[in-house]
Image (spheres, helix red, strand yellow):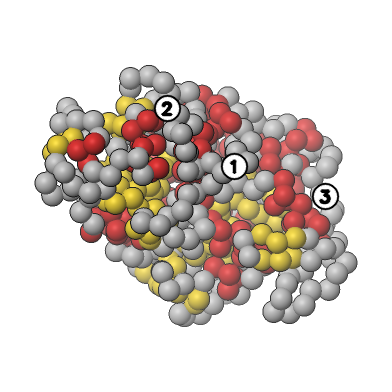
Amino acid sequence: MKYQSGNLPAISGVDRRDEEFMTSQPMRPNMTSLKMKLLGGAFFMAAAGFAGTASATDIFGGGATLPAPAMTQAFKCYSGATTGVDYRVRDSANNLNDTAEAACPSYITTPVNAAHLYHYAASGSGRGIAGFYSHDASRFGTYLSTPFTSVEYALSDNALKQADLDAYNNGGTIQGVTVVAPGVTPTPGTNYANPFEKYGALIQVPNVIGAVAVAYKVPTGVTIGTASGKLELTKADYCKIFNGAVSYWDQLPNVTGHVRIYRTGRSDSSGTTSLFTRHMAAVCSFLSTNKFKDPAGTGTLPSTTGWRLGAGNSGVATILSSTNGAIGYLGSEFLVGSSLVAASLQEGTSATFLQPTAANATAAYNSLAFPTPAGADQFNPLKWVPTNLNSSVANPTAGYPIMGTSNTLLYSCYSSAAKVNALLAPNTGALGFFRWYYTNAAVNASNGVLAANGVAALPSALRTSIYNFLRANIKATGGTGCVGKGA
């Protein structure tokens, strides 16, 4: 299957055994946040380690930090792991550091399935893509303890484009990784086997809707005179900040205090940066020189000379917390439970200013009227997610303006039925992770796990379509389209 044509089996709705998708549960409106731990420099997630579980299937992945807090919580709930949990975050030295596991909220019955253990290295979207294409877990970073032994999935806020899909299928270079063409033997240490030939067709589906915040800690010597006490910025205001057209806080509306602005952002290959950059490229055209758009009209991060840069969203949050006058962009999930403040940004062309909440990100997504792919379009990974090619996602007419989806990358062929069952368990009542994740009410409710971690669930109809597509098209080696293939 090379995403050219084909038809899905006739599957009407989700499996009736996914009862929590059909019924809602009472939710607790508040839950303990993971973010304070993350701001301390920690972030790696896994649901690993029921000691003595002989039949455990380990599933390894890495990538985006934007969905990481929510997915950490979900992995923990799914496996109910109490020992051997292995959360890791890549630091500025490229090391993957362990950190403490996070508790599952009490309103979820856990474990869902203790036999399947999920591991995740939060190393940034670019490294996630590199690890996935190469099937080389060392691409996520340097392991200070036991390295991952395989790669089954990745997460990326940076939606793949046609050139990326062409590289996967036919060979090419992406995120510093070169994969050879089908039929070509790779050179160890130089390039990697063709992933389509080895692991089957690439699958890209969204997992959450996320917002990118313009964040700060109120500087010493600055007073913000809005009713909320928070910055209220029009598109012109924040375009001027990040293009360097203003240099001091008192050049912003309703602000007093002549304190220097320090622009702050990511030092690594980041999907959060991609979401931020495409928005800035779209809305800052009124400036004579919009540094977020190159001469060809493509969105690009401008020269960061003079910026304060951090590794990962957690690194940016640390700089914002410790630098008087810093203003930067980071995933809104890193604001939950922190001392940082998000600016309220202009909604569309209105006089309304919105915070980067899950509800406001959902409103923006809904304003796109992005179609759920059907028929042959389902076999095209580019059809499942809003991309830079869809201009409306760069500047939505309603809701919070800087947003997008974080996306899951999967192979279509896996080396064993055990891995397929860990991913989906499509034909049994023992739920695989993604089957449970896309169909569980406690995860996806408006006050569920995702929203409590600062991201929004996908619309229910889209989640149903994603689950049905995965269920029909992820197979073990030897299955249709997977003879001789499997990750």
Q: Position of residue 355 (x, y in %)?
A: 33, 34
Locate residue 9 relative to residue 238 in the image: left or right: right
Disc 2 versus disc 1: distance between alpha carbons?
A: 30 Å
Question: Residue at the location (81% across, 57% down)?
Answer: 170
Q: Secondary structure at mark 3?
A: loop
Q: Please, is residue 211 above or below residue 304 in the view? A: above
Q: Secondary structure at mark 1?
A: loop
Locate residue 447 relative to residue 252 in the image: left or right: right
Q: Check residue 399 in the rendering and tell me which mark sits there, or answer none.
A: 2
Q: To which residue does mark 1 refer? A: 295
Q: Position of residue 380 (x, y in %)?
A: 74, 41
The mark nearer the N terminus, 2 or 1, is 1
Please state which of residues 348 and 32 is positioned toward the viewer in this rendering: 348
**Which image quarter: residue 308?**
bottom left
Q: Residue furthest front?
A: 288
Q: To which residue does mark 3 refer? A: 1
The mark nearer the N terminus, 3 or 2, is 3
The mark nearer the N terminus, 3 or 1, is 3
Question: Residue at the location (37% across, 30% down)?
Answer: 236
Q: Residue furthest right?
A: 183
Question: Residue at the location (68% across, 41% down)?
Answer: 382
Task: Kindly identify the amino acid type of the residue bearing the numbered disc 1.
Answer: Pro
Q: Please, is residue 471 above or below residue 417 in the view? A: above
